[in-house]
Amino acid sequence: MVEKLKKMKSDVSENVEEDVLLGWVLKHSSLSTEQILDLILSLLFSGRETSSVSIALAIFFLEGSLAAVQQLREEHLMITRAKQQSADKELNWEDYKKMDFTQCSLKKLLGEEKL
């Protein structure tokens, strides 16, 4: 559909339907096809799916990178060991802020940041 609307845009002197989100994005942005599809899918996904589904998908996609899983495991074990040595046993915001690779991975999986 992206390619069809792009062809319409060039063939009919930019007479692309603006009442369709895809048409509006094509007419008013210079995003690549990949960026447009990412935007549309992100909007559809975030408007429909719950946090639990997002977390499940993040874990599913992590399986494709065993090195990332290992680095996450090491980061979490380091924090777990530090917690075992302290009086405070529960994770808190300060612990999360120490999880640099975890934060980077989540942003990458959610499309917020390029690695």
Image: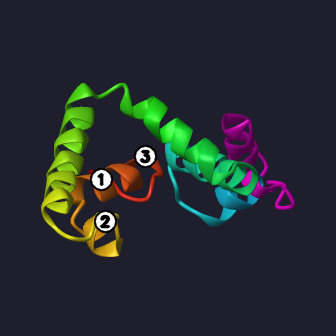
- Residue 20 within the segment the image draws in magenta: yes
| Earlier-in-chain disc, 2 versus 3 | 2
Residue position for label 1: 102
Residue position for label 3: 109
- SS at badge 3: helix
Tell me the kind of residue under disc 1: Thr
Q: Would you say residue 14 is visible in this rendering?
A: no
Residue position for label 2: 96
Tell me the kind of residue under disc 3: Leu
In the rendered image, the vertical position of residue 43 relative to residue 92, given as above or below: above
Residues at marks 1 and 2 touching, judged by CB atoms closer than 8 Å: yes
Horizontal and vertical percent position of residue 9: 72, 49
How far, Cα to Cα, is label 3 from label 1?
10 Å
Residue 65 shown left or right of residue 77 in the figure: right
Horizontal and vertical percent position of residue 54: 57, 46
| Earlier-in-chain disc, 1 versus 2 | 2
The residue drawn where x is 63% and y is 42% is 53
